């Protein structure tokens, strides 16, 4: 495969334990000024952090050009119509810069809304995806005559994460591409190839947008490692053990080159700490 030019995005530290919420707009403005392609969130509910929607809304208001992405938002933890309205609002505030990255989730403690438990989440997401499209199209909600969103609301593009065939099936039916987990390139390369194959077999035109994730901490590597282990403490052991943390210029440059070889479109470095200076440190390497 011919090497591609990889865009470089940066995550928001909304998932860092006890993050100071006021950091988010400052981080966003610095990231845009530094020239990153995208600002991305990683979210959980049962964790002392800031939700995807709040962080993305803050980023939308603090920036004017940089892309916005949830990477990924656990959609089945939300009532579908409510999430559709939230996402449409953030996209509208940003001027149409948001991409909704969707995952199904796997931890029981994330599913706190009555009637929206872990069981049945895949089937529920299937129904919700249709709801998103209807809400964004301006169809009336409930039994009344009113839509939930302003006229002119667009269909927000979606990317899908996950490792099951069903995730790829949703991608080709509803989405524009695929997001990998924050694992080594050797581990994610088969998933990207599977996404390309599913796209072709479904008869979709062009190629899917492929986004790779990786953690980084350039100021305090020890704090970054501790934060990642804490964040994934209740996750399957192989995820916590294999999450990639980049702490040097050499490892960052190597991963970018490796993902260029794989043919991904964008690599997003997720911060493992909320040290604002890590925006400039990363930018000095990749932009």
Image (tube, helix red, strand yellow):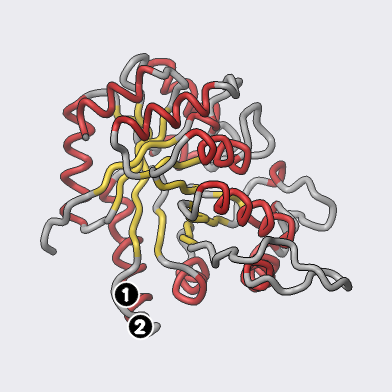
Front residue of this view, candidates 186 and 88: 88
Front residue of this view, candidates 3 and 111: 3
Could you tell me which quadrant the N terminus lies in?
A: bottom left
Residue 157 image offset from top left, x and y in percent: 48, 63
Tell which residue pokes out farthest to the right in this image: 143
Q: How many marks?
A: 2
- State the SS at label 1: helix
44 sits to left or right of 78: left
**Whole-number angstrom distance, CA of label 2 to CA of label 1:** 6 Å
Q: Residue drawn 59% across and 65% down?
A: 152
Residue 186 image offset from top left, x and y in percent: 26, 50
Q: Report which quarter residue 29 is drawn in.
A: top left
Residue 146 image offset from top left, x and y in percent: 80, 68
Tell which residue pokes out farthest to the front in this image: 151
Is 184 located above or below residue 81 in the figure? above
Q: Which residue is mark 1?
A: 197
Answer few, some or many: residues within 10 Å of disc 1's Cα (few below 14, many 20 plus, some between 14 and 19). some
187 sits to left or right of 142: left
Q: Residue drawn 31% across and 46% down?
A: 267
Q: Which residue is mark 2?
A: 201
Is 135 located above or below residue 26 in the figure? below
Query: Could you say which disc has been placed on residue 39 in the image?
Result: none
Tell which residue pokes out farthest to the left in this image: 2
125 sits to left or right of 33: right
Q: Residue drawn 55% across and 55% down?
A: 103
């Amino acid at each position: 495969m011919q090497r591609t030019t990889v865009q470089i995005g940066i995550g928001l530290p909304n998932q860092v334990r006890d993050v100071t919420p006021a950091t988010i707009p400052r981080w966003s403005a610095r990231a845009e000024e530094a020239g990153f392609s995208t600002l991305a969130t990683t979210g959980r509910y049962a964790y002392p952090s800031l939700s995807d929607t709040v962080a993305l809304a803050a980023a939308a208001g603090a920036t004017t050009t940089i892309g916005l992405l949830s990477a990924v938002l656990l959609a089945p933890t939300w009532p579908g119509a409510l999430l559709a309205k939230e996402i449409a609002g953030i996209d509208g505030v940003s001027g149409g810069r948001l991409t909704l990255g969707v995952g199904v989730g796997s931890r029981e403690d994330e599913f706190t809304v009555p009637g929206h438990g872990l069981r049945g989440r895949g089937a529920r997401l299937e129904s919700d995806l249709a709801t998103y499209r209807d809400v964004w199209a301006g169809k009336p909600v409930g039994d009344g005559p009113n839509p939930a969103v302003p006229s002119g609301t667009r269909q927000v593009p979606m990317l899908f994460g996950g490792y099951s065939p069903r995730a790829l099936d949703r991608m080709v039916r509803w989405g524009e591409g695929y997001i990998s987990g924050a694992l080594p390139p050797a581990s994610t390369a088969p998933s990207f190839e599977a996404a390309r194959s599913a796209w072709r077999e479904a008869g979709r035109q062009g190629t899917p947008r492929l986004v790779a994730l990786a953690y980084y901490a350039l100021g305090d590597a020890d704090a970054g490692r501790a934060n990642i282990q804490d964040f994934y403490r209740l996750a399957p052991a192989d995820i916590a053990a294999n999450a990639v943390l980049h702490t040097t210029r050499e490892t960052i440059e190597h991963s970018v080159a490796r993902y260029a070889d794989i043919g991904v479109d964008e690599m997003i470095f997720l911060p493992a700490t909320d040290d604002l200076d890590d925006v400039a440190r990363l930018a000095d390497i990749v932009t």
